[in-house]
Amino acid sequence: CTIDISFLSSVGGEDNTSLASQDVIDQMVKDNLSGKSTVVRIMNAAPKARLRNGFDQMKVKGGGYRIDIGGGSSNTVRFYLNAEGTEGASSTYGDISIPEGNLYFSLPCFGSSVKQLSSKEGNVTVRPIGWHTGWRRRK
């Protein structure tokens, strides 16, 4: 699955148009209970994700993101996007499907900016949220 996204950020520290609404904030994962986090900002996504190297598509909507500040330089960008899902669609491939709802991700970053994401092709964690989602995938 390939999804094109863009992280909105403030310009010059004065632009508030990238700040997320309360609805977006409420949908963020709440797992950084003891650490610090940046404010939640808007994340845009292309209207469709490409599945199976572009042979199939799935509708997606943007979501939100924040940076969880760890000790030293171990910061993590946490973000989500809303997916239409593939259940019952022709884009289901074998026994693999994507449920409708939010998909949660986390990536390592350097500093406190999404401009410094790790460029090493590596692990992206897809985090199932909720009881018995029916799918689990962690790389």
Image: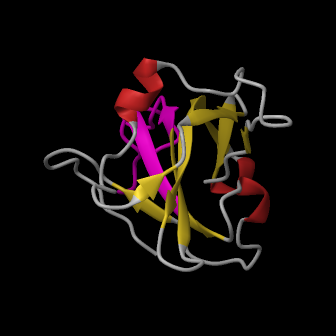
Q: Main secondary structure of the magenta part?
A: loop
Asked whether the viewer can see residue 112, the reply is yes
Question: Residue 64: where, in percent of width, then height?
Answer: 54, 36
Residue occupying the point 37% across, 61% down:
35
Residue 87, percent across and down?
37, 36
Residue at (22, 51) in percent of width and height: 134
| Location of residue 31 by image quarter | bottom left
Task: Give the vertical position of 74 relative to 125 (above or below).
Answer: below
For residue 25, above or below residue 107: above
Would you identify the image quadrant in which residue 121 lies? bottom right
User: Does 92 sit above or below residue 19?
Assistant: below
Horizontal arrangement in the rendering, residue 34 relative to residue 109 (left or right): left
The reply, left or right, for residue 100 in relation to residue 37 is left
The colour scheme used here is: secondary structure
Please tell me which residue is depicted at 63% across the width and 55% down the height of the picture: 52
* 71 relative position to 87: left or right: right
In front of the other: 54 or 134: 134
Residue lying at 76% horizontally and 65% vertically, measured from the top left? 116
> In this orientation, which residue lies closer to the viewer: 16 or 64?
16
Say if 89 sits above or below 37 in the image. Answer: above
Can you say which quadrant of the picture contains the N terminus? Answer: bottom right
> Left of 124 or right of it: where is 135?
left
Percent of width and height locating residue 115: 79, 57
Q: How many marks?
A: 0
Q: Is residue 94 magenta?
A: yes
Query: In the rendered structure, which segment of residues is drawn in magenta?
Result: 81-106
Asked if residue 93 can be seen in this view, the reply is no
- Residue 79 drawn in magenta: no
Q: Position of residue 28 (x, y in %)?
A: 40, 39
Residue most toward the left?
131
Q: Which of the two residues, 35 or 53, is positioned nearer the viewer here?
A: 35
